[in-house]
Every structure is written in structure tokens, then in C-alpha cells.
Amino acid sequence: MSNSPKRTGTAHLPLHGGKAPAWLFTRMTKLAREITVAIVSDFGPNEMLYRLSDPYWFQAFGCVLGFDWHSSGVTTTVCGAVKEGIKGMESELGFFVAGGKGGASRKTPSEIEGAGHLINADAEKLIYASRMAAKVDNNAVQDGYQLYHHVFCFTKAGDWAVIQQGMNEENRYARRYHWLGEKVTDFVCEPHSAVCSEANATTLNLVASESSNARDTIAGITRQENPDKIMAQLRNLQSLELPRRHEMLVTDIHPDRLYKIFIKTYENQPEDFEKLLGMEGVGAKTLRALSLISEIIYGVPASFRDPARFSFAHGGKDGIPYPVDRKTYDKSIEILHNALEKAKIEDTVKIAAIKRLELWK
């Protein structure tokens, strides 16, 4: 198992109010449980991690469970249905789900710790992975989406996946981030392999490959520069005309409020950008301020490339946001259809689910 994550996708979804009605969520929970049991039984718990971390499959899964394909609520509802559905079966399955929406997301560390005696892995490493995935998407990738949902799935062996979602109150969209904890050796350099989004966002991307020099410079500033010198540099920037891409001005950062953070980073001497990012109190504004200094004072710019590469899950029948990717969709159907065939569920629920799948053939 790798100690670092792989973000496998991001999806833009319009914010919808309300929640799934009880009659629907009850059925979603049953169906999610049986599909999960079938997949884990046939292919092992790692296959479930892989599927949940794939935004294409995740979206199809939500459709099969009966939720709106384009609603932001598909994220919280699908994750909630899986978590509720396998409750009490985690040890038998070797598959665990922690976290959730809002306050439930903050319980992720304690829930991982609570399952520690049931797994053959270091719970602290899993907690670290959970925390860093959130810090990267909230602070190192500044795309205007504030995280409000974080679910951490893991196995007895310590493999894991993350599904988290952020909200942008201005454009009324949510953006979903998927992570898979395998085959990646670096938290802070291109941790994603696919990002789905309806539209690009104005983004400070400190985990882009082209931000490598900026990451080194930013970490070096916190180790080598006296906090008073950093403050003086920030104040000097207030008299400069910054590039248009810097939507957050120095006056928005409030340098004086960062002084205590800079004292802390100077005293702790973080050896690299990952250690800096993981420090308590180092958030988006701290990194934004340091990236400004890196570019304007030291001539080392960070990337402003939005990591989004793909749009939605499978496209739409009317070609919006793009034509249906039939090959990928057929693969999703095959996996889900096989799982349903083997699942021991009520016939009426099973037939309805299969009919929904058949419509996409």
C-alpha cells in the first residue's frame, strides 16, 4: 500500500436543496449493501475502493440507486447509503466507511481509530491520509470550493479511497474529488489521474507538476526567512500591481493575522512542502501569501491550471455536457449488472434496478 493518495476524479454538480425521501433512502441503503457485498465477495474489498474512486462508476452507481444523476446530493446520498448499508458487516467484509457530511466529516479520525482493532494496518497512517487529502483539496488546490463532505473508505489491509465534495456559494455548484491510495508516491505533486468538471475554475494549483519549484521555494521561505522579513515583503507587495490571475489581493490576506503562523513555521522548520501543508494552522491564506512572495519577490511562480480534465460522468443523451461515453458506461453497467445478478435482494428492488441499467444499453 502506498502512503500517498491518488486523486482519480472531480465532478461539478449543481447544488440541489432537500434530501432523499425516507422511502427512497431505505431502498438505496438495501441496494447499496447488496451491491457492495457482491463486489467485495467476487472481487475483494480493493475493487470496491477502486470503483468508488472512479467518478464514472460512482455516477452510474448513483443512477442505479435511483438518485438524480446531476445533483450535488448524489455524493452525500450514495456515500451515506453505502456506510449505513454495511453497518455491522464491516469486519466480515474487510471494508470500512468513515466520515460523511458536515459534522460527520469531522468524526472521520475517531471512526478510523475505532476500527483500529479490526484492521491489520496502522490507523494513524490512515488518519494522516484522510487529513492530507482534505488539506490538499481545501488549501493546496484553491479553486473556490469549500469542503463540506469527506468520506474515507478503507480495508483491513490498510488500502483506502476518499470521496469528498466542496461547495462554491457564488456559482451554486459543488465539486467532487475522488482519491485512491495506491500507485502514488507524492501527496503534493499531481496526485490526481482524472478530474471531471463542468467548467474550469480560477485556481491556484500548488500540487501541479509545474509548481514544483514554487513548492520548494515556499517551504524554504518558512524555514529561512525571519517572520518579520516575511511580513515586510507582504506589505511591500501592497504597493505593486499584481497579475490579473491573483484574484485575492494582499489586502484580502490580512498579513498581520498571519504573523503567528509564520512564527510557528519558522520555529518548526518544515523540511518540505508536504510537512508545511500538514502543519496545524497552515491554511489557504497562508499558502496564498507565500505563493505571492515566491512569485513576485523570488521570481518562482506557482501554477494556475485548474486540474479539471473531464466533464461529468458519462455525458448526456442530448450531448450535454458531451455525448455519452458508451465504452466506459458499458463497463460500468457490466460491473453493476453482474453484482446485481449475484445479490440476494428483494425481487422488486432488483428488477427495478436492472431495468434502469438496461435503459442505458
Image (tube, rainbow, N blue to C red):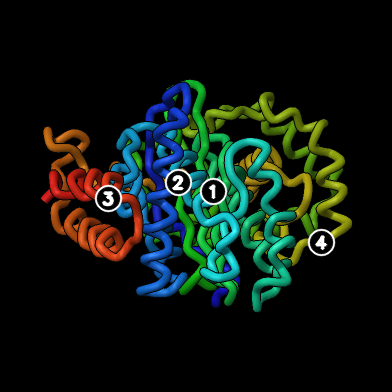
Is any atom of residue 316 visible in this view? yes
* Amino acid carrying mark 1 in the image: Glu
Q: Give the residue number, with chain letter if any, for mark 2.
A: 29
Q: Give the residue number, with chain letter if any, for mark 4.
A: 269
Pointer 2 or 1: first along the chain: 2
Residue beneath the point at 85% across and 59% down: 268
Residue 233 as seen in the image, left or right of residue 140: right
In this rendering, which labeled residue sits more in front, label 4 or label 1? 1
Q: Give the residue number, with chain letter if any, for mark 3.
A: 347
Mark 4 to mark 3 CA distance (whole Å): 61 Å
Secondary structure at badge 4 equals loop
Secondary structure at badge 1 equals helix
Disc 4 to disc 3: CB gap under 8 Å: no
Residue 241 as seen in the image, left or right of residue 9: right
In this rendering, which labeled residue sits more in front, label 3 or label 1? 3
Expressed as whole percent of the image width and height from the top left, the position of residue 47 reads: 40, 69
Pointer 3 or 1: first along the chain: 1
In this rendering, which labeled residue sits more in front, label 2 or label 3? 3
Looking at the picture, tell me which residue is in the foreground, 245 or 186.
186
Which mark, residue 84? 1
Secondary structure at badge 3 equals helix
Query: Which quarter of the figure has residue 281?
Result: top right
Q: Residues within 10 Å of mark 1 (few under 14, many from 20)?
A: some
